[in-house]
């Protein structure tokens, strides 16, 4: 069973990005599962707190879940033309301590998608994430899913109901799963190990 972890970058109860992620969970092909994890309990990063009390329990559990998974699917909002701070905070926590960064991110297949009420989806937020995950040594997939006008596509129960968007999501998820499976081949694994630089 291929296992992916899904993270929404919004804490809002009726988040468009959480709705998109739940729809992706329903769109997973046979032999695959998408486990949705929450970032709500992740505290703000403080180096002093890390030095005195170590890695918070929620962060440690999330790190273990991602390290054991075959890939990571992130649904990111866009705030002020960039990534949301609450999700960036989580991604930074997951890289701590630096000696453990390779275990969590090294060669990890990651896909980015996002939904926004605006006209351009979350293209600027997704662009802002690119150097972050490259620095962390992840195996970032080049596929994109940009959902615009999301306020018209999600109902009052937080369900994505637009047929065209659901069709695009199905294709996106299927292609990412193919990418994850291809990344797991011996040749791909060797290539990933050669390109990962945990100190970059």
Image (tube, rainbow, N blue to C red):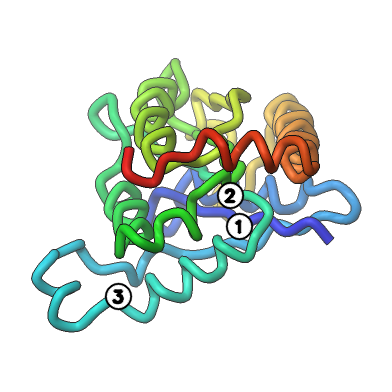
Query: Is residue 113 in view?
Result: no
Q: Residue 97: percent from the left, percent from the top?
A: 30, 64
Residue at the location (49% across, 33% down)?
115
Q: In which quarter of the image is the C terminus?
A: top left
Q: Residue at x 60, y 57 (%)?
A: 5
Disc assigned to residue 5: 1
Q: What element carries label 1?
A: strand
Is residue 167 in sight in this rendering?
yes
Looking at the image, do the residues carrying marks 1 and 3 touch, with CB atoms under 8 Å apart? no
The residue where tag 3 is placed is 55
Q: Earlier in the sequence, mark 1 or mark 3?
A: 1
Q: Give the secondary structure at mark 2.
A: strand
The reply to whether the C-beta atoms of the residues labelled 2 and 1 are less than 8 Å apart is yes
Mark 2 or 3: the one toward you: 3
Disc marking residue 72: 2
128, above or below 16, in the image: above
Up/down of 38 relative to 2, above or below: below
């Amino acid at each position: 069973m291929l296992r992916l972890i899904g993270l929404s970058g919004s804490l809002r109860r009726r988040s468009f990005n959480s709705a998109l992620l739940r729809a992706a969970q329903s769109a997973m092909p046979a032999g695959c599962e998408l486990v949705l994890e929450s970032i709500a309990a992740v505290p703000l990063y403080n180096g002093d707190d890390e030095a005195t009390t170590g890695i918070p329990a929620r962060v440690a559990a999330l790190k273990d879940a991602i390290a054991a998974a075959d890939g990571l699917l992130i649904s990111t909002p866009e705030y002020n033309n960039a990534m949301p701070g609450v999700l960036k905070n989580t991604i930074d926590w997951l890289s701590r301590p630096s000696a453990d960064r390779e275990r969590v991110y090294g060669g990890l297949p990651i896909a980015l998608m996002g939904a926004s009420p605006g006209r351009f989806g979350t293209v600027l937020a997704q662009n802002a994430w690119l150097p972050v995950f490259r620095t962390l040594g992840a195996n970032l997939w080049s596929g994109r899913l940009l959902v615009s006008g999301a306020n018209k596509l999600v109902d009052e129960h937080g369900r994505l109901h637009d047929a065209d968007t659901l069709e695009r999501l199905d294709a996106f998820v299927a292609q990412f799963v193919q990418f994850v499976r291809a990344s797991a081949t011996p040749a791909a694994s060797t290539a990933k190990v050669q390109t990962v630089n945990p100190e970059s």
